[in-house]
């Protein structure tokens, strides 16, 4: 069985080479970047693989047909940075920040205590609910980090629950030094890089986690400095994990340089960058993506990173939610796109590309709408992707559900 999706006013393929062969009736800036095909159609097999993409006028016959009624179709969002495995509530911390209390990572301990106290079933229910919330807003691929357990058992449990929902799991035992190790930070780094990491890879390097991450932030007393972060990342790399880094979030620091030097797939936040950081990211193009998380600047009243400067310099820029209970309890990629366009100088096309093609690359994925690719798509109640930022706050986009084989 194959399904023909037709009535697509605008299809974003992230595949400019393909779109070149098909005529764009108007030439908007960004069409080439997004690989836009107007008045398009798609054929999807019943096992969810794209079989054909092109202009509706050339569409082949299929067993079934669905008319999308003049909507836009985009690749599903790839949310390459989230912390969905947590229990508890920190809304009062958010309210305090809105009246001037700065963020310093101290609240993470509140989520750690609540997460440790939650049952497996309760955590599972919370994480599944958050993934469903993302899907309802157009996200079809999500990366999920551990990092609110911070004991061997609670980190493993967090990764196992995350793995039930996505293959893109990240071990973040080095989120902060938990309170019980505050007087002996070195012992905690040894725990993370020794017994915890050993347990994470015990069934094979990527059986439970695809990547390792560290909150490298000399401006927080709770997070890790450059030397500690290097120790964590080198241990993770030796164990066969891909590398991700939380860097340069609260101030200038070594995170970006370290990530680029070690060949991390992504360095995330990048809020405070010097010229040498931008140079390092330019040199690491093709290997290390700069993942911007503007929901964090929104929710912490911080300055937004200069996305325009990064894109103009040639850096690979991705957008993700960072959905977490502290710095951004928003799972909405459309919200991140609207902020990137309004506050960070990206065009709507650049923002959409960042939240799909580039974020996918940071997870080692090739996410184009092309024959042979999975049909991970989202549909807009709007004729063009421009509405993602234009209709900010309005729920116009959702993951496209296809009939199961
Ligand atoms: O990405 N910066 C470190 N970790 C999260 C926040 C975690 C929290 O406050 O609960 C972040 O911003
Ligand atoms: Fe984060």
Image (cartoon, grey):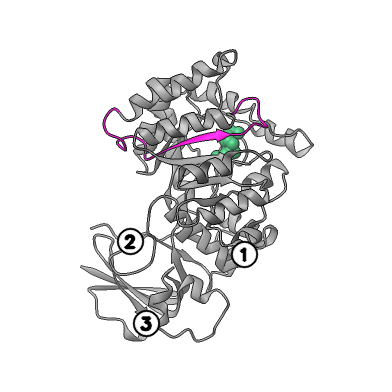
SS at mark 3? helix
Q: Residue at x 43, y 59 (%)?
A: 76
Task: Check disc 1 and report the residue beneath it.
Answer: 312
Q: On screen, 68 above or below 22?
A: above
Quadrant of ligand 1 in image: top right
Q: Nearer the viewer, residue 347 or 7?
A: 347
Residue 56 is tagged as: 3
Q: Residue at x 44, y 30 (%)?
A: 123
SS at mark 1? helix
SS at mark 2? loop
User: Which label sits in the foreground, 3 or 2?
Assistant: 3
Task: Check disc 2 and report the residue beneath it.
Answer: 402
Q: Residues within 10 Å of mark 3 (few under 14, many from 20)?
A: some
N-term mark: 1 or 2: 1
97 inside magenta stretch: no
| Residue 285, percent from left and from top | 50, 56
What residue span does the magenta drawing correspond to? 202-223
Indicate the quadrant where residue 256 lies. top right
Residue 391 is tagged as: none
């Amino acid at each position: 069985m194959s399904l023909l999706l037709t009535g697509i006013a605008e299809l974003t393929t992230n595949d400019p080479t393909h779109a070149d062969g098909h005529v764009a009736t108007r030439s908007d800036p960004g069409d080439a970047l997004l690989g836009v095909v107007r008045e398009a159609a798609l054929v999807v097999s019943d096992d969810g693989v794209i079989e054909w993409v092109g202009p509706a006028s050339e569409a082949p016959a299929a067993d079934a047909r669905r008319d999308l009624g003049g909507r836009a179709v985009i690749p599903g969002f790839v949310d390459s940075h989230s912390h969905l495995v947590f229990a508890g509530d920190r809304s009062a911390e958010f309210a305090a920040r809105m009246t001037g209390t700065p963020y310093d990572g101290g609240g993470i301990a509140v989520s750690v205590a609540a997460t440790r106290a939650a049952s497996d079933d309760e955590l599972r229910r919370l994480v599944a609910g958050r993934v469903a919330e993302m899907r309802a807003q157009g996200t079809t691929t999500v990366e999920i980090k551990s990092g609110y357990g911070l004991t061997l058992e609670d980190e493993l449990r967090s990764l196992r629950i995350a793995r039930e929902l996505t293959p893109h799991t990240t071990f973040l035992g080095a989120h902060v030094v938990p309170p019980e190790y505050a007087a002996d930070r070195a012992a905690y780094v040894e725990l993370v890089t020794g017994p915890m990491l050993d347990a994470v890879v015990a069934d094979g390097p990527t059986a439970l986690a695809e990547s390792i991450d560290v909150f490298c932030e000399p401006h927080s007393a709770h997070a890790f400095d450059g030397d500690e972060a290097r120790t964590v990342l080198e241990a993770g790399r030796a164990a066969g994990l891909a590398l991700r880094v939380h860097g340069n979030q609260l101030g200038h620091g070594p995170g970006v340089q370290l990530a680029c030097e070690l060949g991390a797939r992504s360095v995330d936040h990048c809020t405070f960058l010097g010229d040498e950081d931008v140079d390092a990211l330019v040199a690491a193009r093709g290997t290390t993506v700069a993942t911007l998380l503007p929901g964090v600047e929104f929710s912490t009243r911080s300055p937004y990173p200069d996305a325009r400067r990064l894109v103009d310099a040639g850096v690979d820029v991705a957008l993700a939610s960072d959905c977490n209970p502290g710095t951004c309890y928003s799972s909405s990629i459309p919200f991140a796109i609207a902020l990137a366009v309004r506050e960070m100088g990206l065009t709507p096309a650049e923002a959409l590309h960042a939240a799909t093609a580039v974020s996918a690359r940071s997870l080692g994925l090739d996410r184009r709408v092309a024959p042979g690719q999975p049909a991970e798509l989202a549909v807009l109640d709007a004729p063009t992707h421009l509405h993602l930022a234009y209709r900010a706050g309005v729920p116009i986009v959702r993951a496209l559900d296809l009939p199961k084989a």
